[in-house]
Image (cartoon, coloured by chain):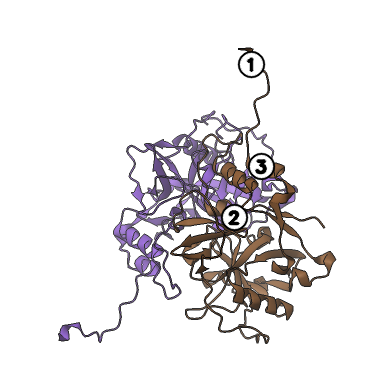
Chain colours: A brown, B purple
């Protein structure tokens, strides 16, 4: 009977932070520098976006071509609509596109689910039959199709009315509650890995849809490049927790069932946009 | 057979905007000025919050007492954590509370669902059995209990670790994806009706949890009052679309099934935080 006396300290609860601290290096994956779009804004701040060639290959190829041509350099952030999106591109709409782009671009709003590994969350979703992650990005599946989900920080391709699909010249990032009505209606091309703190804090525009009415309110885009094209010292490195790993499953379970001291009643669920895979700066 | 020929113009699609434009005056309800908390910030900007006495009566009474005592005047916005919350109160934590507050405050994190009318959305939710709106505010129901939901723009009472529940001296507003894990863990006391464009655009703090590390980064709170206590010319007026009305049901259906020209594939659903009841400035 002496075996059951509990003089030891109670075990510390499993929390999202404790799971991350204990995740082995093998559960982290370095993101290919060819998939990183690096945007340097005025004021020495930097936004880094992971591109999603598995979902929007033609749009991503266009974005590569635009970055390599230096086409985005000197453009600006022209629209910030509160609780919705921040958008950047060419306010004049008149800058000629460089050669080598595919336009009109196919409507890469969804793709076949065949051949994709979706690490599904075991919780119901308001919009889709299944939600989870593909290659570290939030995704949904239904009717044999798969698509990226418009979570906070996700990046899409601005377009006009159908059948226009956007070339990749105008991009936006989500800055509010996930506007899931846009899913399957726009080409989603990636996720902001760094710089959301800057993008989401920009002054809101006073015009229709949050466009700035005064050009002086725009934030200048100094330079946009693919990380692989930058000299190594300037190249950002990021690692993402692999969503097929035991660490990621434990982390989402800890997010869904918060045992941190602050919480009195765990939710027993977590939505896909509150389970965005953890990212960290990679070692050189 | 001539009766079926369609030479008339096709009917314009029903959109959220067309529903609102056609809503009769009787489907709008003026918000009681006793339920409006008016925060005037440095820089002549104003934040207006609708309080929720039906869910957190003791906390709301404390907030009334703090506002009437002028206790919040001269405090500041001290924390902005990207994608999460902006928080204001007394950074020193040392300002004595006025007389007349109820402390410790009961944990008004949820209440009995009995006696409440919840206008439910017909779509599934990741977290709760039922979601919808009570008195114009987003709410959930389950196990015979009801609680307010942490949508973008909702306001809660900052607290330390349990059993502390917060007095109402520290408040926060949600500025990112709805942090639903906080539901039933914190007293939610209202909804920002105006000023989110300012709150959500504040610079993010560089310290732990987004606290500003330099006091100069804080935004000063000039004055906080209940609207009913302001001279009539200074008193804001707001109306909300009644969630039990036919107009609101048509509006949520139009939000769930976007037929606007931009959309190619309606979602057939809308989550509670993307269906926040429309608000407009009321007539004098």
Q: Where is the C terminus of chain A found, in terms of image quarters?
A: bottom right
Q: Is residue A52 left or right of residue B244?
A: right
Provide the secondary structure element on which disc 2 rests. Answer: helix
Provide the secondary structure element on which disc 3 rests. Answer: helix
Q: Find the residue positioned furthest to the top.
A: A1
Q: CA distance from mark 3 to mark 2?
A: 32 Å
Residue designated by label 2: B199
- Whether pointer 1 and pointer 3 mark residues with C-beta atoms closer than 8 Å, the reply is no
The residue under the point 70% across, 64% down is: A48
Q: CA distance from mark 1 to mark 3?
A: 29 Å
Q: Nearer the viewer, mark 3 or mark 2?
A: 3
Q: Is residue B217 above or below residue B66?
A: below
Q: Is residue A199 above or below residue B56?
A: below
The image shows residue A93 at horizontal and vertical percentages of 60, 83
Numbered badge on residue B54: none
Q: Tell me, yes or no, if residue B206 can be seen here.
A: no
The image shows residue B177 at horizontal and vertical percentages of 55, 54
Q: Where is the N terminus of chain A found, in terms of image quarters?
A: top right
Q: Nearer the viewer, residue A79 or A238?
A: A238
- Whether pointer 3 and pointer 2 mark residues with C-beta atoms closer than 8 Å, the reply is no
Q: Chain of mark 3?
A: A
Residue designated by label 1: A3
Give the mark, 1 or 3, whose residue is nearer the N terminus.
1
The image shows residue B71 at horizontal and vertical percentages of 59, 39
Q: Chain of mark 1?
A: A
Dot 2 alpha-carbon crowd within 10 angstroms: few under 14, some 14 to 19, many 20 or more? many
The residue under the point 72% across, 64% down is: A32
Q: Tell me, yes or no, if residue A78 can be seen here.
A: yes
Numbered badge on residue A19: 3
- Please determine if labels 3 and 2 lie on a single subunit: no
Q: Nearer the viewer, residue B178 or A128?
A: A128
């Amino acid at each position: 009977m002496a075996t059951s006396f509990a003089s030891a300290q109670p075990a510390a609860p499993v929390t999202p932070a404790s799971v991350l601290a204990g995740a082995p290096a093998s559960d982290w994956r370095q993101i290919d520098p060819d998939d990183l779009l690096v945007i340097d804004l005025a004021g020495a701040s930097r936004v880094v976006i992971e591109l999603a060639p598995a979902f929007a290959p033609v749009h991503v190829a266009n974005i590569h071509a635009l970055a390599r041509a230096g086409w985005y350099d000197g453009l600006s952030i022209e629209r910030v609509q509160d609780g919705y999106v921040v958008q950047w591109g060419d306010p004049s709409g008149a800058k000629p596109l460089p050669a080598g782009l595919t336009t009109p671009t196919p409507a890469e709003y969804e793709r076949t689910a065949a051949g994709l590994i979706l690490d599904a969350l075991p919780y119901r979703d308001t919009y889709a039959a299944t939600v989870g992650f593909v290659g570290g990005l939030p995704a949904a599946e239904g009717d044999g199709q798969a698509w990226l989900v418009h979570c906070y920080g996700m990046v899409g391709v601005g377009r006009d009315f159908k059948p226009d699909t956007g070339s990749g010249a105008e991009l936006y990032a989500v800055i509010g509650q996930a506007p899931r009505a846009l899913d399957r209606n726009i080409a989603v091309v990636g996720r902001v890995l760094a710089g959301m703190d800057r993008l989401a804090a920009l002054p809101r525009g006073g015009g229709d849809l949050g466009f700035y009415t005064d050009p002086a309110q725009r934030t200048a885009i100094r330079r946009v490049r693919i990380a692989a094209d930058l000299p190594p010292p300037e190249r950002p490195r990021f690692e993402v927790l692999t969503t097929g790993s035991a660490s990621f499953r434990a982390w989402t379970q800890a997010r869904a069932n918060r045992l941190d001291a602050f919480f009195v009643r765990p939710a027993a669920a977590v939505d896909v946009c509150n389970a965005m895979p953890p990212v960290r700066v990679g070692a050189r």
